[in-house]
């Protein structure tokens, strides 16, 4: 029998009584560590004090690091979570420099015609910044540039000449063809593009058999061989760039990505393409997620997501983008919210017991003030026919509401491995073991056998 922290056994994490016990332990831990937050939390959970949307968001954001610390102790992965957080903190100067120096100062330092007359190479040779470039967009250089320049800005008078040269280099990197080529895959010297509703997809024109036809630029194409994954969401730096691009507008109650963009009459607005801007269909706490991710609270960010979207493994950057359409940025590129969400889940799954952490947060979640643990058994039995995204999501919510659920699908269903199901081929009980490394169970998408999910969960959004 696997016993985790606080004397909680693994099997208890999959039963309501064990989750009630776990929740009580969390509450006691919170009380011991932050009595003021504990009092706010209990008042909100008991419903004895109404909260505004802003107060509700702030309470959850304040709770998230405590949930993260508790989960770290529960699974014995505090050190690994800290290392993941440190990767976030290491990249943080990039986004501060991009916002405060590159966009606010360097972008306005020179006119486009002036930029064409200067040499970025020559300026860089005068700056005391290590510079090595590679095909991945020179992330190491950009981090060095950001750290050193932000240091200079702490004493602007003493570093005036260096700051001016750095601004000229940044202007060159932003606006010149050579600068964009050098930093094309980078983050620091990349500005959001203005949106043209009539030209949302970049295309090229060519003549075929005397006819003008449109095609995607070669740079937009990815080689497809079989059903192997061609888009892995890229590096953490790119996702954090998007999280930091967010202006965290839940603070002003304008988080239209989550709640939609409304007219004064209360109806949802439509954009110039007549698309209704109703935001995330789940009203996921997107701005709050972005804030926690940008601050290096990886497990807390996932806890925030799973309050409204426990089945986030089925959404993310290859699936939906209603939130992006309703982003507060309507005249320039929106925040790539699904990309951030993908990394929020991906970074937790990469931890030891990452799958178990995610699985637990879909059943027990202190940030879910209304239902932190599954409800007691109702005695109802429910059959769910079809186990695509809608079917398995419905099944999950029905189980958390206390019902017994059986799911069937038209595609082939394979037996669940014994160590995961806890039942052998003859129906007897076997050891129910936690999954420590989910990557070890992954199968190549173009080799795997259909295993029991249906709809586009099997043959489409793999």
Image (cartoon, rainbow, N blue to C red):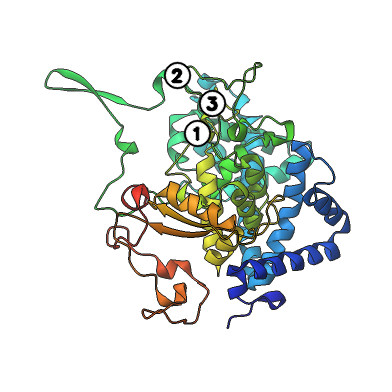
Of labels 1 and 3, earlier in sequence is 3
* Residue 42 vertical placement versus 253 (above, below): below
Does 450 sit above or below residue 105?
below
Circle 1 SS class: helix
The residue sitting at 81% across, 40% down in the picture is: 50
Q: Quadrant of residue 228?
A: bottom left
How far is mark 1 from mark 3, CA to CA?
8 Å
Residue at the disc numbered 1? 322
| Numbered label attached to residue 277 | 3
Q: Is residue 353 visible?
A: yes
Q: Quadrant of residue 168?
A: top right
Do we see residue 134 in this rendering? no
Q: CB of mark 1 within 8 Å of CB of mark 2?
A: no
Q: Residue furthest front?
A: 379
Neighbours of disc 1 within 10 Å: few (<14), some (14-19), many (20+): many
Residue depicted at 35% across the width and 53% down the height = 454
Q: Secondary structure at mark 3?
A: loop
Q: Are marks 2 and 3 in contact (CB under 8 Å)?
A: no
Badge 3: how crowded within 10 Å, few (<14), some, or many (20+)?
many
- The label shown at residue 273 is 2
How far apart are the two marked residues, 2 and 3, measured between alpha carbons? 11 Å
Q: Whole-percent x and y of residue 458?
A: 34, 53
Residue sitting nearer the eye, 457 or 333: 457
Q: Does 108 appear above or below 35?
A: above
């Amino acid at each position: 029998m696997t016993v985790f922290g606080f004397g909680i056994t693994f099997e208890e994490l999959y039963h309501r009584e064990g989750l009630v016990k776990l929740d009580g332990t969390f509450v006691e831990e919170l009380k011991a560590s932050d009595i003021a937050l504990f009092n706010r939390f209990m008042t909100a959970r008991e419903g004895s004090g109404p909260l505004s949307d802003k107060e509700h968001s702030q309470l959850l954001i304040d709770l998230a690091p405590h949930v993260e610390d508790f989960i770290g102790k529960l699974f014995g992965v505090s050190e690994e979570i800290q290392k993941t957080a440190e990767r976030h903190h290491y990249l943080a100067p990039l986004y501060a420099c991009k916002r405060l120096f590159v966009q606010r100062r360097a972008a306005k330092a020179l006119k486009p015609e002036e930029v064409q007359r200067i040499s970025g190479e020559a300026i860089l040779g005068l700056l005391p910044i290590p510079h090595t470039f590679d095909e991945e967009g020179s992330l190491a250089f950009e981090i060095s540039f950001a750290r050193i320049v932000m240091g200079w800005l702490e004493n602007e008078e003493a570093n005036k000449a260096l700051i001016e040269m750095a601004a000229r280099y940044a202007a060159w990197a932003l606006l010149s063809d050579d600068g964009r080529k050098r930093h094309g895959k980078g983050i620091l010297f990349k500005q959001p593009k203005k949106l043209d509703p009539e030209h949302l997809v970049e295309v090229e024109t060519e003549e075929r058999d005397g006819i003008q036809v449109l095609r995607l630029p070669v740079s937009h194409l990815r080689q497809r061989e079989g059903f192997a994954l061609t888009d892995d969401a890229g590096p953490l730096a790119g996702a954090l760039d998007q999280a930091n691009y967010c202006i965290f507008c839940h603070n002003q109650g304008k988080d239209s990505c989550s709640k939609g963009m409304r007219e004064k009459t209360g109806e949802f607005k439509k954009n110039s393409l007549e698309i209704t801007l109703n935001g995330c269909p789940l009203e996921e706490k997107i701005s709050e997620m972005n804030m926690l991710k940008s601050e290096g609270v990886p497990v807390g960010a996932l806890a925030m997501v799973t309050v409204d979207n426990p089945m986030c493994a089925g959404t993310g950057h290859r699936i939906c983008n209603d939130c992006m359409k309703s982003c507060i940025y309507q005249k320039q590129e929106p925040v790539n919210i699904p990309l951030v969400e993908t990394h929020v889940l991906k970074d937790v799954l990469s931890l030891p017991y990452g799958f178990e952490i995610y699985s637990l947060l879909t059943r027990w979640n202190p940030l879910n003030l209304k239902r932190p643990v599954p409800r007691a058994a109702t005695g109802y039995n429910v059959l769910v026919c079809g186990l695509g995204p809608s079917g398995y999501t419905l099944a999950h919510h029905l189980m958390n509401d206390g019902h017994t659920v059986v799911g069937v699908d038209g595609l082939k269903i394979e037996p669940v491995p014994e160590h995961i199901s806890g039942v052998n081929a003859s129906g007897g009980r076997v050891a129910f073991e936690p999954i420590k490394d989910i990557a070890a169970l992954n199968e190549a998408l173009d080799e795997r056998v259909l295993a029991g999910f249906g709809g586009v969960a099997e043959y489409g959004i793999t």
